[in-house]
Amino acid sequence: MNTTIQLQDLGLQDYKTTWDYQEELFQGVVNLKIQNRREETTLATPNYFLFVEHPHVYTLGKSGDLNHLLLNEKQLEAKAATFYKINRGGDITYHGPGQIVGYPILDLENFFTDIHKYLRFLEESIILTLQEYGLDCGRSEGETGVWLGVGTPFARKICALGVRASRWVTMHGFALNVNVDLGYFDNIIPCGIRGKAVTSLHVELGVEKVPEAEVKAKIIKHLTQLFEADFVTK
């Protein structure tokens, strides 16, 4: 078992470029697993974790409803935004500047073979990070992600999750709103959930900007503990 995770921070990068890169890493891990099974070898499979920030983009999961995008093609262009239908779970979401996106490409057989546990660990890393900023946050029953004000009329989502897994190899991941222009969420029904708001860390803290490098470091600290992993920077 290989519990080392290669950490890469891609900075601001186009969504499709990053998606293609994820697919390349993902397929490489899957191919090595197939080779190990076919040739009865035990070559260690790598694990990756990508941090990235995307230009304005809306993505729709394979079970999502296109009607949850409230813009037509011309309106997307006017907002300098793009749209992709992709192969993760979940409905529609927004990515943009000021949002920390994390894409783990992990062979879960290096850690544990439980997708439910995997999703809860991703959520937990964000919950623990936000608690360090004094926020009371948690899970909302039946709604993946991390929320504030759960069970109140002021429930609001701060982190979305959507993953894909095949042969216990994961891709896609989470999107945490840190310094996001929340106006872009007005153009969708986020995650297909009506009547609930979306928020951002800088709004909750009442500050102009939260240091994103600081937030990333906290997330990695908690992921390291939860997955009992070693992150190495590439």
Image (cartoon, helix red, strand yellow):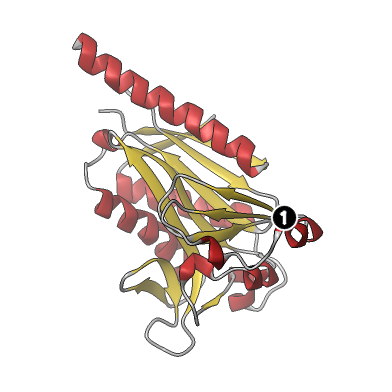
Q: Residue 176, image x and y in percent? A: 53, 60
Q: Is 34 rendered above or below residue 82?
A: above
Q: Is 206 rendered above or below residue 62?
A: below
Give the residue drawn at x 31%, y 74%.
Answer: 141
Q: Is 131 rendered above or below residue 116?
A: below
Q: Quadrant of the C terminus?
A: top right
Mark 1 neighbour density, 10 Å: few (under 14) some (14–19) many (20 or more): some
Q: Residue 98, image x and y in percent? A: 66, 59
Q: Residue furthest right?
A: 78
Kindly state the secondary structure of the residue where label 1 is placed: loop
Give the residue drawn at x 46%, y 82%.
Answer: 155
Q: Residue furthest left?
A: 40
Q: Residue furthest top?
A: 39
Residue 26 placement: quadrant: top left
Q: Residue 185, image x and y in percent? A: 62, 69
- The amino acid type found where label 1 is placed reads Ala
Q: Is residue 182 visible?
A: yes
Residue 146 placement: quadrant: bottom left
Give the residue drawn at x 60%, y 45%.
Answer: 52
Side (left or right) of 185 relative to 124? right
Q: State the residue position of label 1.
A: 81
Side (left or right) of 114 relative to 126? left
Q: How many marks?
A: 1
Front residue of 214 and 18: 18
